[in-house]
Image: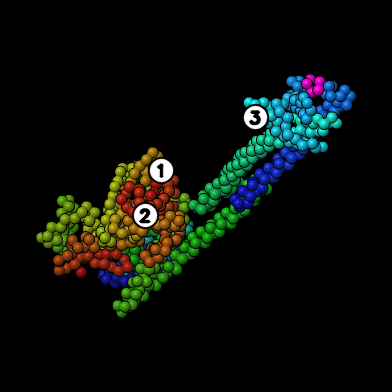
Amino acid sequence: MGHTSEREAHSVSARILLVEDDSQIADYIARGLDQEGFVVDRADNGRDGLFMATDSQFDVVVLDRMLPAMDGLTVLKAMRAAEVDTPVLMLSALGSTDDRVSGLTAGADDYLGKPFSFAELLARVQALARRRSGVTRVQDTLLRCDTLELDRLTRAVRRGTRKIVLQPREFRLLEYMMQHQGEVVTRTMLLEAVWDYHFDPGTNVIDVHISRLRRKIDDGEDRVLFHTVRGAGYRLAVD
Amino acid sequence: MLLLVAGVFVLQLMSSAGAIFFLRGQMLDVVRADRVRQVLDVRDDLLATYLQGGRPALAQMIVRQQGSAADPTVFIALTGGPNPLLSNLARAPQLPVAPNPRPVMVHLGPDIPDIEGMAIAGQMSDGERLIVGVMGATERRFNLAFATAAGLTILVAVALALASALLLGLEISRRTFAIAQTAEQFASGNFGARLPESRSGDGFDHLRVQMNRMADRIDTLVSELGAVSVSLAHDLRSPVARLSAAIDTALDRVDEPGAVEALHAARENADGLRRMLDTAIEITRLEGGAVADQRAPIDLAAVVQDMAELYEPLAEQSGVLLHTRLAPATVVADRELLSRAIANLIDNALKYGAHAVLLSTTTGPGWAEIAVSDDGPGIPEQSRNRAMERFVRLDNARTLPGGGLGLTMVKAVARLHGGDLLLSDAVGAGTGMRGLLATLRLPA
């Protein structure tokens, strides 16, 4: 949906379990994910969802919070109790901080308030799928993207031979982008990960931070690493 | 109205003056008649003595009268004969013979000023002239007495009128003040404010009853409007989501750059609409207190510092200097909500401020404040309350993007924390700014 290049990002079609009782929303999500090359299985209530999640292998579970038969939070707790460690993206119409906290405490890997833009959901599903496939090297101390290097221990950043001085927040921003290189990261994801805020400021606050960082990294270089993904966010990659 | 009251007051004074004047005339007539009778009685006595005993008897009586304690104000003169007689007099007054007493000046002695009196002159059969009179300036004394009385009356009337006007005014202003106070509360958004109704049935009670009925009606309309707008916002979310999905689908199918550009613009606007709807619903949740308590002790200065850092690049890009003047202030608050509120205030200040925005935190006994001031055009005092209402965008804001929910959201967050949002002039607030000063006050 607007960024077809992402299709190549997960060569092996990742399997998604979508547990959502609202058929309209479920259709919308399933169609979108299908177009992005995911294989989507659907359940419209909590009990079926739990059964499917424990029975077969999925890369990501998209789980609605409010479900008939068994609510999303119970499904999640039961999954974790059964040692099913599939990454779970929880959806909720409640959508405020308190719900997020209880969702994450119950073992959700990410949380998204309804309504969301599909680009936001897609970016998050892709991030979770990638984490599942072990592509992301979250634990590495030295992060690399083309000639860009970031040392998480010494906090040194260089592009080739050029030393780059970053403010602490810029460092965290770049660190997050490098951990998720090749993936689309949305403004909301950045605000959550780097600033620990869970609201949408609505203005281009994050864009300005990115463009500042981008100048420090890409200015004067032959290959640019920062890419803007229209309608979604940003991507750090060689191409 | 005031003229009418003054006119009534003057009429009242004039009528009481008239009454006093009339009374004076009546009393003067009575006293005059009394004195005339007194003069005539004395003369008749003298004449009777004269008729019985001739002139010697008369002379004897006049002499007896002289110095008599009986009535020192009565004076008698017998003139025109070989040996005139004077009683209580130094010189006989000049008086023509007449059937009725007349006013006359009485000479009592060389060192005593003449005094007024009333006397009658009669011609005796032997050619002598008998003058009988009483001393005393009846009319002048009366005039004096009545002038005093009138003066006192006017003085008392004026004092009473003033006092009653003052009391009446006080009572009216006390009652209207109570009404105005309630109206003010109502105007500032407390739609539950009502006036106490009594059954006295006077104009004020009627006013109170009618105002309460008006308030009930407005309250009903406002809550209906609120409910309608919230359910509208809820209902609009699905079509907006479908709109976004349709735009995404279209984006996937077209390559023509112009169409892609237009679809991206449509997509951004759909996102903006979605955010507005979300915020509107969130505000309703906040106003209704329908949020879980996530409050914890936090340092306001740290939260503001974080937000300042978040917005600093945007400020720089907009050519605005973002200053901070932070003092540590611990409050019990929901960090997320408070940060959103501060973000809204900064966003607003950046939108309308010209060159500088100041963020400050201060504390006082029992409270802590976050103040965001700018050097923009500010908001006129009469528009400030409206600026915090849902979807209200003041005239100068129409050209800038935004849904008119920013300040509403901040106020809702402030209220949820038991605080308030106040808008004022930055001028004179010691910030060095001259635009709008938005103060988020929280209990500490």
What residue does disc 2 label? B436
Nearest to the eye among marks 1 and 3: give it.
Answer: 3
Amino acid marked by disc 1: Pro
Residue A26 x %, y %: 42, 66
Where does the N terminus of chain A fall, quadrant-wise? bottom left
Amino acid marked by disc 3: Pro
| Co-location on one chain, circles 2 and 1 | yes
What residue does disc 1 label? B443
- Give the structural element (helix, strand or loop) at label 1: strand
Work out which residue is located at the far bottom of the displayed protein and give it.
B256
Nearest to the eye among marks 2 and 1: give it.
Answer: 2
**In terms of image quadrants, where is residue A38?**
bottom left
Specify how the rendered protein is coloured: rainbow
Work out which residue is located at the far right of the displayed protein and give it.
B52
Q: Which chain does tag 2 point to? A: B
Q: Earlier in the sequence, mark 2 or mark 3?
A: 3
Residue B326: in magenta span? no
Work out which residue is located at the far front of the displayed protein and give it.
B82
Residue B113 bears which disc, if any? 3
Determine crowd level at label 1: few under 14, some 14-19, many 20+ residues with C-alpha closer than 10 A: some
Q: Main secondary structure of the magenta part?
A: helix
Is there a contact, CB below 8 Å, between mark 1 and mark 3?
no
CA distance separating discs 1 and 3: 88 Å
- Give the structural element (helix, strand or loop) at label 2: strand
Amino acid marked by disc 2: Leu
Q: Nearer the viewer, residue B21 or A26?
A: B21
Q: Earlier in the sequence, mark 2 or mark 1?
A: 2
Region of the chain picked out in magenta, as a range: B59-64
Residue A152 x %, y %: 18, 53
Left or right: residue B230 versus residue A156 is right
